[in-house]
Image: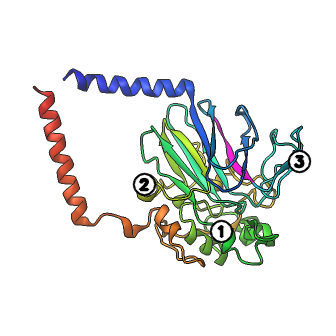
Amino acid sequence: MDLLLFLPLLSLAFLLSRGISGATFTFVNKCDYTVWPGILANAGSPSLDSTGFELPSDSSRSFVAPTGWSGRFWGRTGCNFDGSGSGTCETGDCGSGLMECNGAGAAPPATLAEFSLGTGGQDFYDVSLVDGYNLPMIVEGSGGSGMCASTGCVTDLNRICPSELRVGNGEACKSACGAFGRPDYCCSGEFNSPASCKPSMYSQMFKSACPRSYSYAYDDPTSTFTCTGADYTVTFCPSMPSQKSSKDATPMTTTNGGDGSMSESSGSMGSQTGSDSSGSGEMGSDSGSGSQALLADGSYLAGLAMGDSSRSLSSSSRYALGCALLAYAVFFFSFLQL
């Protein structure tokens, strides 16, 4: 019985320690080329130890963010920096002219990971394609409590990008908003509401390939995730889906950022560019967050990695699992009485 009294105290100590130390972000590069991550803290949040750095293939680097921190991460590709750190990148360039972004955001198109760490409560996070796409990315939480689902886009959208959205020789894929600037694609003007801004043919195509990524401004229900007290790993070019990312549940539904959420429609974590700041309608909402997409290259990787419903347990299997867990719980608490 003493153990039962101790467990709540242990949980409280964990939350208090998280409140002091914040969260650790670990960046992992599984691409077969170098990536230069960029980091942008939101207004009111301190800068981390770096705002931009080199991350060679098969390497990793970690940073600690204080509790309450919010901001975004992305990967830059095709960069050329000299010995003094001056240079530019083909995709995701932050316009600083340096390896360090120094408070500047990514030039679209760029795949974005967005976070808002709770102060003793839930963290909110998402992977956003609102500013387009430049490379695959997955976010995974560890050591936290709650849903803590993995999210991201493992599909190489550059390979299936429509010609009208393609950048250069296929190194990135624009949003429809970025390519055409139409209010219905950008969720701006008379389309600046969930009721009036609807998925486009571009949004539906990309959403089917990356069902858990933010696809346009009002794509909250299938794209915003929560966790409490976790550390996070941001992986570029994940080679294979992890067990966690293939079984995680759908995200919590949120429709605004009033509670500190990462809602794109709230503008709290929206696009850095003027054309997308009110959201772009390019990667639209699809309620099938577990859908499996057969891509042009014959790959089913997107559906597999992002929670394809065909991989879920049958009702009989869930019943058997529930009985087993109940039996274990009865045995455990009987043991405590000894």
Q: Rounded to the nearest whole Å, what is the CA distance between mark 3 and mark 1?
A: 26 Å
Q: Residue flagged by tag 3: what amino acid is it?
A: Gly
Question: For residue 157, which numbered disc appears in the image?
Answer: 1
Q: Which x, y percent locates residue 18?
A: 51, 28
Q: Nearer the viewer, residue 33 or 99?
A: 33
Q: Residue at x 61, y 52 (%)?
A: 30
Q: Residue flagged by tag 2: what amino acid is it?
A: Gln
Mark 1, other Cα within 10 Å: few <14 / some 14–19 / many ≥20: many
Query: What are the residue bounds of the magenta stretch?
Result: 69-76
Please give left or right for residue 326 compared with residue 226 in the image.
left
Question: For residue 243, which numbered disc appears in the image?
Answer: 2
Q: Is residue 71 magenta?
A: yes
Q: Residue flagged by tag 1: what amino acid is it?
A: Leu
Q: Which residue is disc 3 drawn over? A: 87
> Which of the 4 image quarters holds residue 52?
top right
The answer to whether 230 is drawn above or below residue 276 in the figure is: above
Q: Which element carries disc 2, helix, strand or loop?
A: helix
